[in-house]
């Protein structure tokens, strides 16, 4: 194969591995044949089923970059501008004794330059003349192809789709057009746009999980069925995973915009009771504001009853800053900081769990396969509510003895009651799923007879 006979131009943000695959296709060869031009020091990451992940990335050494530039028929500077990983050095190949040889190492795209998604094939064809698969570094806040009305899906998941059709969902496309304005607002507020989007996405993804139990929710089911081609049918659970990010995108942009507005921080402060803390009520003004801006005037009470949302941490940080309450030593109070445990599960992760549950066949070896979604949700809700009660005790040790004692005892007793209820729900679910009563009792630190009486009397009812 004569290098550079057929010129292949890179796409902006394209994975180096994606470009190599397109070069191979241009010459009518398998990608593995072209990859032999480099000495590969390892193998690409694969799915559990054995297939190579679409987001498997290649990092090249200096000699290897020269080979790719010659092969594509373009200058190395062009590749450096287009390919985020092109100039990334890997010590294993850049500093080795064989550095003069063209070498490559496989890496996960997320560990090199961020989230990877499938590119729009129509755009690829217009740009390169090849209607081929391309994979690009594309953050979740930029997944809509405005030209062709497509949502570009994560490239790390083991599923066959590259995009979702948005032509019947103009509100998703409109949200993408609004995002640059929200990003500019974030910059003016001193917040990284990526942080604002990430927090808003976590908030709304949390709502998405709860929405199954919202009787008045009609917007997301309609969108999801449209994304599924008209009807998700018997694959509803699969589509809820694959279609989530596209379905919730308008609300994510709306929530990010609301949280960045200075007036929202004031609403959160007033709703908390200001310098005289009070419990959250069903008519909480912040929750009402978010529900209204999300096109759901009825949603406020639902959000007010939810104590496990990342929104509560944002609210808490705003309120604590105004009360001048100090956190633990080394704690950095940042309203836009999202805790690791609050990050929503990715599509790839959820699909892996679904596949594992399908293999277990409901035998009881997998919690999610044997415990209903309603039971899991109730347990999580109780634990989150208890956590929220305890978080509100931070900095409470000031005031009269009676005031402090009353606040501590009321919150602690409420938290204890919630944990007790969560314990009973969990034990009930475990025993119903086949766990021996004696084991459940030992894990609960209760006598087996006492646990048996509790379960027999209430069957896990509050």
Image (spheres, rainbow, N blue to C red):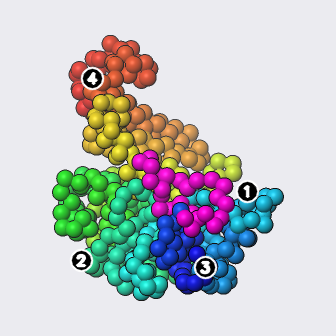
**In the rendered view, would you say 437 is above or below 148?**
above
Q: How many marks?
A: 4
The span picked out in magenta is 33-58
Cα distance between the residues tagged 1 and 2: 49 Å
Secondary structure, mark 3, is: loop
Say which label, 1 or 4, has the lower sequence index.
1
Q: Quadrant of residue 151?
A: bottom left
Instruction: Assess whether residue 44 is covered by the magenta stretch.
Output: yes
The residue indicated by pointer 3 is: 2
Please state which of residues 243 and 395 is positioned toward the viewer in this rendering: 243
Residue mark closest to the camera, 2 vs 3:
3
Whether residue 5 is visible to the viewer of this picture, yes or no, is yes
Measuring 74% from the left and 65% from the top, which residue is drawn there?
101
Residue 95 at what x, y percent from top left? Answer: 79, 60
Secondary structure, mark 2, is: loop
**In the rendered view, would you say 445 is above or below 392?**
above
Instruction: Assess whether residue 371 is covered by the magenta stretch.
Output: no
């Amino acid at each position: 194969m004569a290098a550079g006979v057929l010129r292949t131009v890179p796409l902006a943000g394209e994975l180096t591995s994606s470009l190599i695959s397109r070069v191979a296709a241009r010459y009518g060869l398998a990608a593995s044949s072209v990859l032999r031009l480099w000495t590969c020091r390892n193998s690409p990451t694969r799915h559990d089923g054995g297939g190579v992940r679409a987001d498997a990335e290649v990092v090249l050494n200096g000699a290897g970059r020269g080979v790719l530039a010659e092969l594509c028929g373009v200058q190395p500077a062009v590749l450096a501008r287009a390919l985020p990983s092109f100039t990334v050095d890997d010590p294993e190949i850049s500093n080795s004794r064989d550095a003069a040889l063209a070498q490559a190492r496989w890496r996960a795209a997320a560990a090199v330059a961020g989230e990877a998604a499938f590119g729009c094939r129509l755009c690829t064809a217009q740009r390169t003349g090849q209607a081929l698969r391309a994979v690009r570094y594309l953050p979740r806040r930029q997944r809509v192809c405005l030209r062709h009305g497509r949502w570009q899906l994560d490239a790390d998941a083991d599923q066959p789709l590259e995009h979702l059709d948005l032509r019947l969902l103009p509100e998703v496309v409109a949200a993408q057009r609004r995002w640059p304005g929200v990003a500019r607002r974030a910059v003016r507020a001193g917040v990284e746009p990526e942080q604002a989007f990430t927090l808003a996405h976590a908030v709304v993804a949390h709502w998405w999980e709860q929405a199954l139990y919202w009787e008045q929710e009609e917007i997301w089911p309609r969108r999801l069925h449209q994304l599924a081609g008209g009807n998700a049918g018997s694959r509803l659970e699969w589509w809820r995973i694959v279609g989530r990010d596209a379905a919730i995108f308008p609300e994510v942009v709306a929530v990010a915009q609301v949280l960045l507005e200075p007036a929202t921080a004031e609403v959160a402060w007033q709703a908390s009771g200001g310098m005289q803390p009070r419990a959250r009520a069903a008519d909480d003004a912040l929750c009402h504001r978010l529900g209204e801006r999300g096109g759901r005037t009825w949603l406020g009470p639902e959000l007010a009853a939810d104590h496990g949302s990342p929104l509560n941490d944002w609210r808490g940080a705003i309120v604590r800053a105004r009360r001048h309450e100090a956190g633990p030593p080394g704690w950095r109070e940042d309203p836009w900081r999202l805790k690791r445990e609050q990050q929503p599960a990715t599509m790839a992760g959820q699909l892996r769990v679904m596949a594992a549950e399908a293999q277990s066949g409901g035998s009881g070896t997998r919690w999610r396969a044997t415990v209903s979604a309603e039971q899991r949700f109730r347990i999580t809700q109780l634990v989150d509510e208890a956590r929220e009660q305890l978080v509100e005790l931070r900095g409470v040790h000031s005031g009269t003895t009676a005031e402090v004692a009353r606040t501590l005892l009321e919150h602690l007793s409420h938290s204890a009651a919630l944990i007790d209820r969560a314990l009973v729900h969990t034990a009930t679910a475990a025993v119903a799923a086949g766990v021996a009563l004696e084991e459940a009792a030992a894990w609960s630190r209760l006598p087996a007879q006492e646990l048996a009486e509790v379960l027999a009397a209430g069957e896990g009812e509050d």
